[in-house]
Amino acid sequence: MAGELLELIGISKAFPGVKALDQVTIRVRSATVHALMGENGAGKSTLLKCLFGIYAKDQGTISMDGQEVIIRSPKDALNYGIAMIHQEPNPVLDRSVAENFWLGRLPLKKIGPLRFVDQEMMERDTQHWLNEFAINTTPRTLLRELSVSQVQFLEIARAVSLNARVMIMDEPTSSLTSSEVERFFVIMQGLIKRGVAIVYISHKMDEILRIADDVSIMRDGTLVGTWPASELTTDLMVSRMVGRALSQRFPKRHTSPGEVVLSLKGVTSAKPRGLANVSLDLHRGEILGIGGLVGARRTELLETLFGLRAMAHGQIIIKGHIAHIHSPSDAIAHKIGFLTEDRRATGIIPLRSIVENTTLVGNSRYVSWGFWLKGPQRLIDCLKYIRELRIKTPNASTPIRNLSGGNQQKVLLARWLTTAPEILLLDEPTRGIDIGAKHEIYNLIGDLADQGKSIIMISSEMPELLGLADRIAVMCDGRLSGILAAKDATEAAIMRLSTQFAPASPTH
Amino acid sequence: MTTSFTRKKLYDWSIEYAIYLVLLGLILTISIQDPGFFSWSSLRNILLASSTRTIIALGTAFVLVSGGVDLSVGRVVGLAAVVSASFLQGLSYPRRFYPQLDALPLWLPIVIAVAAGIAVGLANGLIVARLRVPPFIATLGSMVIVYGLNLLYFDRPPNSSQPIGGLRDDFTFLGSGDILGVPIIILLAMICAVVCWIIFNKTVLGKNLYAIGGNKDAARVAGINVESTLIIIYAIAGALAAFAGVLEAARSGGAKSNYGEMYELDAIAACVVGGVSTTGGIGTIPGVVAGVLIFAVINYGLTFIGMDPNLQFIVKGLIIVVAVAIDTRKYLTKS
């Protein structure tokens, strides 16, 4: 058995009023993948921030190779060989690959008494690492031109070039396509051969069962336990994470879909490489899942429907009438709501209150005397949604950024519900949300459909599509490759349709 | 545990109200130096000096909260002062801008001047929202253009760049008269502040303004017409600056083309000291008013106790940096 490389012993951290970490002890063996699991708020990220020197821990020790190390900043952590691959890398988009690779440690050369950046050496060395990790780009390419996966691989290469011995990966596969995930796993195997220990955070159970050696599960700031992955199953992990067994993951539906409320006829994007000739029907009270790989332009379909993207030709027909939708406000007027994929980028107004975030779309419904916003009524409605959607918050005036991801998502859902929509477009509604909150969102979506709302839901998680949708439309390369009834659909069938037009990977 | 907890609360509280504490501290320090400072006449002088500055800063606050900046407001002040003054000279004054012009009703030139300010604001808004020129650049350009327009107008024969004087009494009354012992100009500034507070807190425009400044893409998805909201906001900034320009002319009894020079930077300074974020989405009207008052107290108070005027610049600069450094603590992630 490999020796313990990194030990976190008895780590505690308190914030005013909250014990975020309570005596957490985790031992990571070298040359292994150690998965760290837990719902959002379980303390995973607080633990890693203590490890990485972003927070000062109140108690406990960190050791590398049995020697206690003092880490006060990310720079200290890097010096001890601990690197972090962030969920969403934040590179300098308009500088070259090489410059990003060497950011913060640019190599210098002396010319007389002066020191200049050694461009040649920088590019040569970067090229070496690009080859090493088979990243198909050049040192001089602008970072902006790289795909998400290339950026991620570059980050890993950079960490390895820094002699990182412990690599923390926070949901690294969340924005990769399935073929990129496979390559990613190959790279991880390579890292393990080098003796690197990987601390891997993910909500994807199947991934963890596949690649992890050890699994540590956290709940409410404490460690539930560490087990060899070989002894675990999805159900076991879920029940240990939430502290209860989730008997039934997806809600049972009580109604069957009614008449057609929305038809797309030959919808084609104005810009090249967009949607091509997409036609489909959406029924009243139906959940229509949209499957496909990342890059299949599923989001573009919803954005076109919502008036954020222009259509070259095709028709959107709502309840038998042609709808002219050129802007979000047109779409809202047609009683369409759109929960976007990226909560932080296009959803929340971080510093504003829950009331304000909830009523952002519906504000005009609260106006009297032509300009005055009725505060009390907004608050009453907001409190109603906090109760109905079970949003966990101290009060309605809390800034939304203080809530967990799942609760933020519920507020955004409430935002659309204030407009009494008939058609809801949901783009990856459970992305980056912990398992308990996911379950609640599934129930909410099921309830909304039972109330007669028609829902189009994009999801990259197969179980979600199969468990929640009535029908599944699969897209590939901007086209609709097929529609399956959920009860006959299988993961294999969806996968086949997803690659039907087969320019296999859109990025390489 | 209890003591550290209360100390923490005290710290949070003092950060939350830092601007007002700074204002209070300034007044106390100056009063200790010279107890004569603590008087009605000081208050009156400080408020008088703050009045037009407040109105300009209010407009600037709209733009800053939206995530933009408006450098043209200072020059709009000058344009509005010259335009309103040029129509409001006494008929008997020898060097009139429009020698043949009959007496106009008082409101008309004011409306013309404010309309000019709105026009500049609309142009700013269109350039920023539709042409997607960064606000700093767009308003830097319009700042220079407005000054050029003002110089051209000011240079019209027979005036030929002479200071405009001999303003009508009913006009100068706006700038120097009292109602029930309160200067009208202070009342007008207070009314502007109240109206802006209502817009910020009680109207859809205000909520949309915070949303656009806080997350423009989210605002767009929420169906907010970001472009037209921005255009309205720049127009409001232009209107308020122009109104302040009119009052500056009324108060000083004349107008020159260089009125309002650098006022835009004073307004930005007052806003940021008052807790408005230059990256948008954050700011309150009471904060802006406090920001303006801080600078007025410094100007008046430090002169009152006889501080070297050269030194006063250094104090003002330090206040800007320190106040914003303290205010930033509020938004650092605590969790």
Image (cartoon, coloured by chain):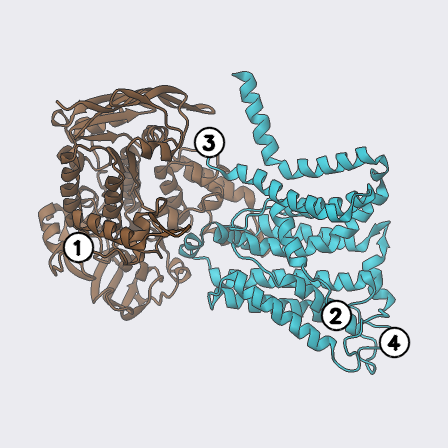
Secondary structure of residue under mark 2: helix
Q: Nearer the viewer, mark 1 or mark 4?
A: 4
Task: Tell me which amino acid carries mark 3.
Answer: Pro
Question: Which chain's residue wears label 2?
Answer: B
Say which residue appears at 42% left-offset and 40% top-offset.
A385
Task: Tell me which amino acid carries mark 1.
Answer: Val
Disc 1 residue crowd, few under 14, some 14–19, many 20+, Cα 10 Å = many
Name the quarter where the C terminus of chain A is drawn.
bottom left
Direction from residue A348 to residue B170 in the image, left or right: right
Disc 2 residue crowd, few under 14, some 14–19, many 20+, Cα 10 Å = many
Task: Point out the tag, 1 or 3, that comes first from the N-terminus.
Answer: 3
Q: Quote the CA–CA distance across marks 1 and 3.
A: 41 Å
Say which residue appears at 48% left-offset and 54% top-offset.
B212
Task: Residue A165 in the image: state x and y as whole percent.
Answer: 24, 33
Task: Residue B97 in the image: state x and y as whole percent.
Answer: 80, 77
Q: Does label 2 lie on the same chain as label 3?
A: no
Q: Which residue is mark 1?
A: A474
Disc number placed over residue B91 in the picture, else none: 4
Q: Does label 2 lie on the same chain as label 1?
A: no
Disc number placed over residue B82 in the picture, else none: 2
Does the residue at mark 4 contact the one at mark 2 (Cβ under 8 Å)?
Answer: no
Disc 4 residue crowd, few under 14, some 14–19, many 20+, Cα 10 Å = some
Q: Which chain is brown?
A: A
Task: Residue A202 in the image: state x and y as whole percent.
Answer: 24, 36
| A6 vs B245: above or below | above
Task: Tell me which amino acid carries mark 4.
Answer: Leu
Does the residue at mark 3 contact the one at mark 2 (Cβ under 8 Å)?
Answer: no
Question: Which chain's residue wears label 4?
Answer: B
